[in-house]
Image (cartoon, grey):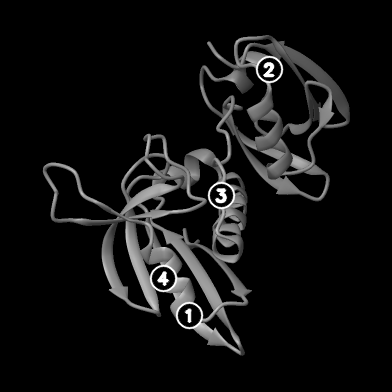
Amino acid sequence: MSDEFEATFVVDLAPGDVWEALANRVIAGEPPDEGAVHYVLPGFPSFAVLPIAGARCTLVEQDPGRLLRVKKDHEPCAGTEIAVRLEHAGSGTRVTIVQSGFGPFLEIAGRDTVFGHGHQIVTDFRLYLERGLTVPGTVWGANLGARPTQTPTGLLIDAVHPGGFGERVGLEAGDLLLTIHGIRIHDIQQLMTVLALIDPAKKTEISWARGRESMVGSATPQE
């Protein structure tokens, strides 16, 4: 299965204007790579502190007005490649973003989790292009300690990481996550939002279904 995340949207800007907006976010390299060209891509998260919001990426290839290809410098997902392709679309520009090279991280975190976060990234990237605004990246909250997959009835737990929050609560592979802190969790976006809002140092209650039985457990997300 491909590890590429891809999203496409159209903005009411000419390709040259979109390119200029991206080119405005070039920053100088730091020792020992002073000669390297770095772009700070809006919307993409970074654990490093930067002078402008976004993720610092090293230039791999560029075709002004058509293609920007970079490699992400910092975690999360350091080393992944991001390609931004620009094409005429009527009076506007079709923007295609492809992020690839997640490697084992995709299996550990879960495809639905990683790609669900990708859609939030693209929303903030588009916000910058259309309105010239940047916002703080998505808050990375408590770690569930389990790998969920989207199903028609909610998030199914595929695997539970040893010693993690999910294992301490009592989750097992095959369980269907129902609520966290009393909030029904339907999808990955809700899961990430709720985990970002809870205090990882305080005991948090989780409920889940095991077969036709409803179960409840609690633990502190942070060990």
Provide the residue designation for mark 4: 20
Expressed as whole percent of the image width and height from the top left, the position of residue 137 reads: 54, 42
Expressed as whole percent of the image width and height from the top left, the position of residue 108 reads: 48, 39
Between residues 169 and 139, which one lies in front from this camera angle? 139
- Hey, which quadrant is residue 217 in on the image? top right
Between residues 8 and 66, which one lies in front from this camera angle? 66
Horizontally, residue 222 falls left or right of residue 46, namely right
- Give the CA distance from mark 1 to mark 2: 52 Å
Which label sits in the foreground, 1 or 3?
A: 1
What is the count of numbered marks?
4
Provide the residue designation for mark 3: 111
Q: Mark 3 or mark 2: name the one nearer the start of the chain.
A: 3
Q: Describe the element under mark 1 as helix, strand or loop.
A: helix
Which label sits in the foreground, 3 or 2?
A: 3
Between residues 86 and 213, which one lies in front from this camera angle? 86
Horizontally, residue 174 falls left or right of residue 223, namely right
**Residue drawn where x is 37% and y is 53% of the image:** 80
Q: Mark 4 or mark 2: name the one nearer the start of the chain.
A: 4
Provide the residue designation for mark 1: 15
Identify residue type, mark 2: Gly
